[in-house]
Image: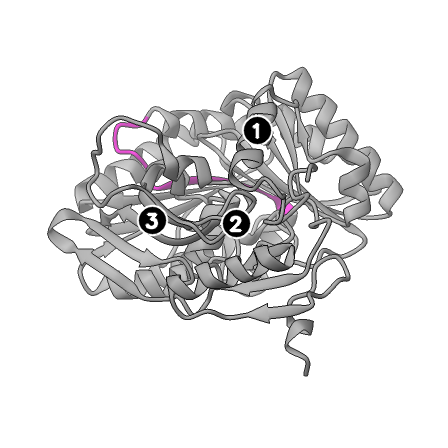
Amino acid sequence: MDLTARYPLNGHIPREVRQPQTVEEVAEVLREAARSGWAVVPWGSGAHQGIGHAPTRYDLALDLTRLSRVLRHRPANLTIRVEAGMRLADLNAMLAEHGQWLPLDPPFGERATIGGILATGLSGPLRARYGSARDLLIGIRVALADGTLIQGGGEVVKNVAGYDLPKLFHGSLGTLGVMVEAAFKLWPRPKAEATWAFGFSRMEDALPLTLSMLRHPGFPLAVEVLNARAWEMLRGTLELPEDPGARVWVLVRAGGWPAQVERIGRDAAAAASGAQVKDRLTEETASLLWSRIPDIGFLPSPAPRDGMSVRLGLLPSQLAEGAAALEAAEEIRVVWRAHGTLGLIYAEGRGPMEALLQWADALRSFALAQGGHFTILGGPESAKRAMGLWAPLRPEAEVMRRIKAQLDPEGRLNPGRFGWA
């Protein structure tokens, strides 16, 4: 099999694939590409290549998965520096031996690499407690389009004030430079964990629980809300509670010292007075469940032609209205989940493309009317072009264009990912 066929994007394959094993080799590949005028697309596992627009030019696939070493781990300082091609799952397996972890759980996290997570800025349920990768990132090393290596931040949690290079590259979709190394602050693994599931007939009945967890002093690890379709998908492979009358399920994940965990569970049960089902999951079931929840609401890459995935940003108190808007279109089969304490909703819709575009347009209008935001995370490129990826369009977009022009003046790194060269 031709190696280039393993790196398709929007029906196109690159002229060439490179798989460097060192940072210096990455820099040399970029210098060669600059001399040839080739457009470069950085690759990790490929799990998140569907985020953003498809590149307008695609000559070279730069596969970073061979850059997968731990460069420095300081357990006493709770910091680590790794190469960007390392898989998150492998990193956390190593850290478990020290009772530590990098508490990130993005979609398709079993495959996702550190560089891919940082480039897309995607996060999962653990964001409720630990924040996103942006909040854990303390240092970065990047190869620019001309092969120049630059570094920002460091390996201590506090650095001197100045230009925050790590946060600049977080969420940049590989358009500003190729991330080759990253340093993070780590967290101790919780001494104990538990997960409770609550089933409700209406989203309105679930709000007292989700809003109480937002203010809870025990800081739950995650509070996720799922619609009935999402729950049934999970029940197909897991032993989860069942109730045909439950249209919304809320999962509360607690972690910390045992007394802290039990307090969160008691308070959650007390706040869930309107729940039809209250159940504490077994440790094995909970572990499997949390490994699968981040994928809900996301489409694989390449996206199917009858699917679209979107994200709505609302206030936590607006989740009931958001749920109603998501399920208003009868032609669309919708699976969704929400960060109950953050107001972020991730939804996947399946149906005829014309109906999907109408569904997405209605959701965008709803989010803007609520003072929130709307993003298309996945779908056919034609749908993305028709709708536009983000709303509202913020004034920072012009700043982003100027930064791109400074760091990549020839527009050769992932050109067009944000809708401009």
Q: Secondary structure at mark 3?
A: loop
Q: What kind of residue is marked 2?
A: Ala
Q: Is residue 167 left or right of residue 315?
A: left
Find residue 207 and report its horizontal and vertical position in percent: 50, 26
- Against 45, residue 165 (above or below) is above
- Verify whether residue 350 appears in magenta: no
Which quadrant does the C terminus fall into? top right
Which quadrant does the N terminus fall into? bottom right
- Verify whether residue 218 appears in magenta: yes
Nearest the viewer among 32 and 51 is 32
Which of labels 1 and 3 is toward the front?
1
- Mark 2 lies on residue: 145
- Mark 1 lies on residue: 402
Q: Secondary structure at mark 2?
A: loop
- Against 81, residue 311 (above or below) is above
Q: Which residue appears farthest toward the left when viewing the image?
A: 76
From mark 1 to mark 3, how far is it between C-alphas?
33 Å
Find residue 343 and report its horizontal and vertical position in percent: 52, 29
Name which residue lies at 66% across and 46% down.
415
- Against 184, residue 282 (above or below) is below
Location of residue 59 (image quadrant): bottom right
Nearest the viewer among 192 and 45 is 45
| 10 Å crowding of disc 3: few (<14), some (14-19), many (20+) | many
Find residue 311 and report its horizontal and vertical position in percent: 62, 36
- Mark 3 lies on residue: 103
**Contact, CB < 8 Å: mark 2 with mark 1?**
no
| 10 Å crowding of disc 2: few (<14), some (14-19), many (20+) | many
Residue range (magenta)? 216-228
Name which residue lies at 60% across and 63% down.
61
Q: Is residue 76 left or right of residue 293?
A: left
Q: What kind of residue is marked 3?
A: Pro
